[in-house]
Image (cartoon, rainbow, N blue to C red):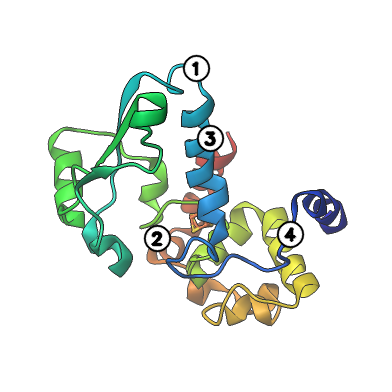
């Protein structure tokens, strides 16, 4: 599996390292290549957005989420703005930039919004094998996606790098070290119920 991935990646150029856990997108390349550049390419090449249009990108980052996000602007010009060359105006608007987490949940309750079911279990929802995963997230990945989890362990061995010092569990061979003590409270209280709920949410 890794060999096949390696061959495919060699054609594209490969780093043989996990994305770095930092704000710099040139080293945390997953965000750049899997999200930002995908969106940028879609804007640049879609017939509706290529030229002669105005786009407002609305996103839900909050300054309270991290030091990096504390520096975000509420409104700004997007990197794909190309008014002179393509007559394409692109703005970013972050309407909940100064909300707290409890503000978000208060609005969800008040307007009876159904949140993503992932938030029944996790306080954070992003790529399943995110480089920022905590040990409890990895424990959950191991239960829900054992094959994916094993691929990360195999990749660590093959690359000779771990995902970071925060995850000695993977460094030492996750299967022995990740255990119930790393699971978040719902897992510990109702492991079978939560497991079936997650199976339903993620695999149905
Ligand atoms: S969610 Fe995590 S793994 Fe996914 S792109 Fe962002 S930083 Fe990378």
Tell me, yes or no, whether the two marked residues, 4 and 3, touch with CB atoms within 8 Å. Answer: no
Whichever of callouts 1 and 4 sits on the residue coming sooner in the sequence is 4
Q: Mark 1 points at which residue?
A: 47
Instruction: Give the quadrant of residue 102.
Output: bottom left
Does ligand 1 reach within 8 Å of label 2's beta carbon? no
Place of residue 189 in the rendered image (x, y in percent of width and height, measured from the top left): 41, 63
Q: Residue at x 39, y 56 (%)?
A: 124
Place of residue 49 in the rendered image (x, y in percent of width and height, measured from the top left): 43, 22
Q: Mark 2 points at which residue?
A: 186
Marks 1/3: CA distance?
A: 12 Å
Marks 4/3: CA distance?
A: 20 Å
Place of residue 15 in the rendered image (x, y in percent of width and height, measured from the top left): 71, 64
Q: Mark 4 points at which residue?
A: 14
Q: Which residue is drawn at 14% across and 46% down?
A: 106
Marks 2/3: CA distance?
A: 40 Å
- Discs 2/1, front: 1
Tell me, yes or no, whether the two marked residues, 4 and 2, touch with CB atoms within 8 Å. Answer: no
- Discs 4/2, front: 4
Q: From where the camera sits, is residue 192 visible?
A: no
Q: Nearest the camera: 201 or 37? A: 37
Other-residue count near label 3 (Cα within 10 Å), few / some / many at <14 / 14–19 / ≥20: few
Determine whether the residue tagged by mark 4 lies in a helix, strand or loop: loop
Relative side of 24 to 168, left or right:
left
């Amino acid at each position: 599996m890794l060999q096949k991935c390696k061959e495919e990646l060699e054609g594209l150029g490969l780093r043989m390292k996990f994305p770095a856990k930092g704000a710099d997108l040139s080293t945390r390349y997953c965000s750049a290549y899997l999200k930002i550049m995908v969106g940028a390419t879609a804007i640049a090449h879609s017939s509706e957005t290529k030229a002669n249009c105005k786009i407002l990108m609305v996103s839900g980052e909050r300054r309270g989420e991290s030091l990096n996000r504390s520096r975000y602007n509420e409104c700004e010009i997007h990197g794909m703005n190309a008014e002179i060359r393509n007559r394409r105006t692109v703005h970013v608007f972050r309407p909940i930039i100064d909300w707290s987490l409890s503000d978000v949940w208060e609005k969800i309750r008040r307007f009876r919004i159904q949140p993503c079911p992932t938030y029944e279990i996790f306080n954070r929802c992003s790529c399943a094998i995110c480089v920022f995963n905590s040990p409890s997230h990895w424990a959950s990945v191991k239960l829900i996606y054992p094959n994916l989890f094993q691929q990360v362990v195999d990749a660590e061995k093959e690359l000779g790098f771990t995902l970071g010092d925060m995850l000695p569990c993977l460094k030492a061979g996750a299967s022995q070290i990740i255990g119930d003590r790393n699971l978040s409270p719902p897992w510990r209280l109702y492991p079978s119920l939560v497991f079936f709920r997650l199976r339903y949410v993620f695999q149905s």
